[in-house]
Image (cartoon, rainbow, N blue to C red):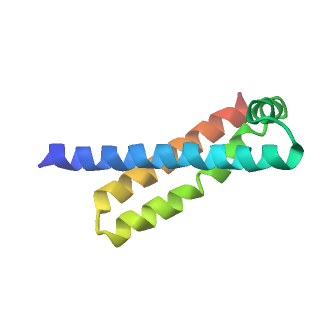
Amino acid sequence: MKQQIAKEIGVGLLFGLISNLAGSYLYLFFLSKTKDLSIESTYLVALEQDLLGNIIALGALLNFVVFFVFLKKKQYYRARGVVLATLVAAIIILISKFY
């Protein structure tokens, strides 16, 4: 039973991380289109201006959608995994701001 719960939380964590990466990519994609730059150069500019944490935070907004979909389907352990992925993103942002 505990293995099943851990598996469900792991699936939610994976979905949360993927949605965070997808949200960050979408933000970079739309930002690069407005500045007429490539996605790679937009990423490099954000990295040199120390804006990577902000991009990760905006990408984490997509976790809301995944979280509420899991709640609507009554998959509570997967929703917990999404919350865990959001906490991982917050820790990454914290580390990127200080180092």
Image point (80%, 30%), residue name: 41
**Residue reaching furthest right?**
35
Q: Is residue 97 above or below residue 22?
A: above
Residue 50: percent from the left, percent from the top? 79, 35
Number of marks in the rendered image: 0
Q: Position of residue 60 (x, y in %)?
A: 58, 52
Q: Is residue 54 visible?
A: no
**Quarter location, residue 68:** bottom left
**Left or right relative to 28: residue 94:** left
**Extreme bottom residue here?**
72
Identify the residue shown where x is 56% and y is 42%.
Answer: 21
Work out whether residue 51 or residue 25 is closer to the camera in this orientation and state it.
25
Residue found at the very far left of the displayed protein: 1
Q: Quadrant of residue 7?
A: top left
Q: Position of residue 26 (x, y in %)?
A: 66, 48
Q: Quadrant of the C terminus?
A: top right
* Residue in view at x 64 percent, y 39 percent: 94
User: Between 1 and 22, which is closer to the camera in this rendering?
Assistant: 22
Asked whether residue 79 appears in the rendered view, the answer is yes
Quick check: 72 above or below 81?
below
**9 above or below 99?**
below
Q: Is residue 94 left or right of residue 51?
A: left
Q: Name the spot of residue 64 as percent of width and height, x first.
A: 52, 62
69 sits to left or right of 4: right
Q: Residue at x 68, y 33 (%)?
A: 96
